[in-house]
Image (spheres, grey):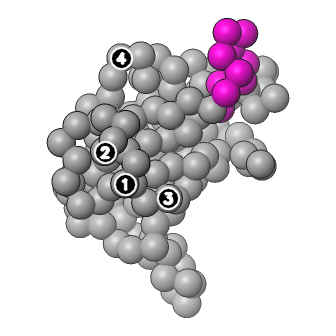
Amino acid sequence: MTWGSVYLHRQRAPRVSISLPVEYDADGASDTLSAEAADSLKKTESKNISEGGLLLILPDRLDLDSTITVRIHVPIKYYTDRNKISPVLAKARVVWTDLIAEGSSGEYHCGISFTDIAPEDLALLREFINRCLSSENPLK
């Protein structure tokens, strides 16, 4: 599987451009971040990611300020004790949404901000982003 290239963006938190598999529930029906709730999520991918949120590519426009649940599949092959893809679960708020391009296939860019993420998931995400920003390649 190809994960994509890593690029640095300067915003509130360091942000890297990377395509990661993401699943989401835009119905707001999931009150918890349990594995059972995550099993009903729709599939998409990220365009970029930071500790504070991510940019998703979605088939439909989401309402501003709506709450969604996301499961981000972060490659953690660089950990010596865990050689796998680890899901990061989070609740998030839609902060902006826009049609990708006029005449496109109707896809939208959707910026989300994390509102509830477990400390261990945030630590994993932070480590992944820091490795993307360093000279280490976290994708190998």
In this figure, which residue is indicated by the disc labeled 4? 119
Give yes or no for contact between labels 3 and 4 (Cβ–Cβ under 8 Å): no
Q: CA distance from mark 1 to mark 4?
A: 23 Å
Quarter of the image for the C terminus: give it: top right
Q: Mark 2 or mark 4: which comes first in sequence?
A: 2
Read off the residue under disc 1: 40
Type of amino acid under label 1: Ser
The three-letter code of the residue at mark 3 reads Lys
The alpha-carbon separation of the residues under discs 2 and 4 comes to 19 Å
Residue drawn at 64 percent across, 50 percent down: 19
Residue 88 in sight here: yes
Q: Is residue 81 magenta?
A: yes
Mark 4 residue type = Pro
| Horizontal side of residue 121 vs 102, given as left or right | left
Q: Disc 2, disc 4: CB below 8 Å?
A: no
The range drawn in magenta is 75-84
